[in-house]
């Protein structure tokens, strides 16, 4: 069965600093990978997705992620964070032809001035 | 108007009561999903439906039932609510196809006393 690990429960970064959120997955076939963001009191919004092709994918709000098959990772990055990036971030892997998602436990991001 | 709506947005109920959470979508998607979110556990799949006549259990279906009244409506019922069903519940929709993504509603916050 597929699984997703987000090893960092909570990360604090200063506004303007760079950010990397880690995601490792376990899946026997080619994975469909996603990053979602949940702002306080809001639903989940898709940041970016990887299906195939270029392993560096660009998303909304200046985020990017790199798929590394050899490391089973799909880490999320942003070169300079803004206070509005404070939220919870979820990595997910799609299974069964991407008909079902398995989510990681999430990483809560706090931004300090 | 939002593409995926959930009602109610907040609900307080008592142990043993039957309650229903409703999800409607205007995206024309045939796939619909119910998840629950608990702190530190991420999102877990309760039930999913590929079309009106195709409903499947997810990883945590015990204590829940669903009804797909139409392509656009998918309801989640708690037959006899218990306190450990206190959680944030999300509905999601997806078009068929492996390169489609799930779109989430705003969530229903449920408290079972």
Image (cartoon, helix red, strand yellow):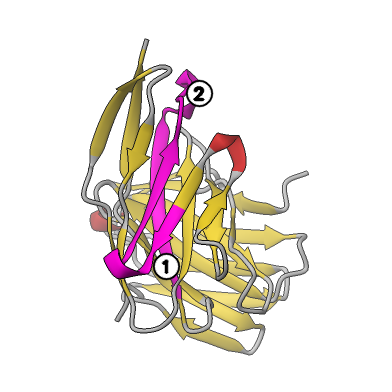
Q: Quadrant of the N terminus of chain B?
A: top right
Determine whether B86 is above or below A26 in the image.
above
Sequence-wise first label, 1 or 2: 2
In the rendering, at what x and y percent does residue B10 appear?
Answer: 49, 42
Query: Does A34 lie within the magenta span?
Result: no
For the point 72% across and 70% down, the residue is B29
Residue B104 has which mark?
none
Query: Does A86 lie within the magenta span?
Result: yes
For the point 68% across and 60% down, the residue is B24
Q: B8 or B98, which lies in front?
A: B98
Label 2: how many Cα within 10 Å (few below 14, some 14–19, many 20+): few
For the residue labelled by badge 2, is the local secondary structure a helix, a strand or a loop? helix
For the residue labelled by badge 1, is the local secondary structure a helix, a strand or a loop? strand
Which of the 4 quarters of the picture holds residue A23? bottom left
Q: Is residue A104 visible?
A: yes
What residue would you read off at disc 1? Answer: A93
In the rendering, at what x and y percent does residue A73 appear?
Answer: 33, 60
Q: B26 or A89, which lies in front?
A: A89
**Subunit under mark 2:** A
**Bounds of the magenta segment:** A66-94
Q: Is residue B18 visible?
A: no
Q: Marks 1 and 2, how far apart in space?
A: 26 Å
Residue A84 has which mark?
2
Q: Is residue B26 left or right of residue B54?
A: right
Q: Is residue B53 left or right of residue A33?
A: right
In the orientation shown, which residue stands out farthest toward the bottom? B53
In the rendering, at what x and y percent does residue A85 appear?
Answer: 47, 28
Which of the 4 quarters of the picture holds residue B104? bottom right
Q: A11 or B89, which lies in front?
A: A11
Looking at the rendered structure, whether the residues under marks 1 and 2 are on a common chain is answered as yes
**Subunit under mark 1:** A
């Amino acid at each position: 069965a597929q699984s997703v690990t987000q090893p960092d429960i909570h990360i604090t970064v200063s506004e303007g600093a760079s950010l990397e959120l880690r995601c490792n997955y376990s899946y026997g076939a080619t994975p469909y990978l996603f990053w979602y963001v949940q702002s306080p009191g809001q639903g989940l919004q898709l940041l970016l997705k990887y299906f195939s092709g270029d392993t560096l994918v660009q998303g909304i709000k200046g985020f990017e992620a790199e798929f590394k098959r050899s490391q089973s990772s799909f880490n999320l990055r942003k070169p300079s964070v803004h206070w509005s990036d404070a939220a919870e971030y979820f990595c997910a892997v799609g299974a069964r032809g991407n008909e079902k998602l398995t989510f990681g436990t999430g990483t809560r991001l706090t931004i300090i001035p | 108007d939002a593409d995926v709506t959930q009602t109610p947005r907040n609900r307080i109920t008592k142990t043993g009561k039957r309650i229903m959470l409703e999800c409607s979508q205007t995206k024309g998607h045939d796939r619909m999903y119910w998840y629950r979110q608990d702190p530190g556990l991420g999102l877990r799949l309760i039930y999913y439906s590929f079309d009106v006549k195709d409903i499947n259990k997810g990883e945590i279906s015990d204590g829940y039932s669903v009804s797909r009244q139409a392509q656009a409506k998918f309801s989640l019922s708690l037959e006899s609510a218990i306190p450990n069903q206190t959680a944030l519940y999300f509905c999601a929709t997806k078009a068929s196809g492996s390169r489609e993504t799930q779109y989430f509603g705003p969530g229903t916050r449920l408290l079972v006393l």
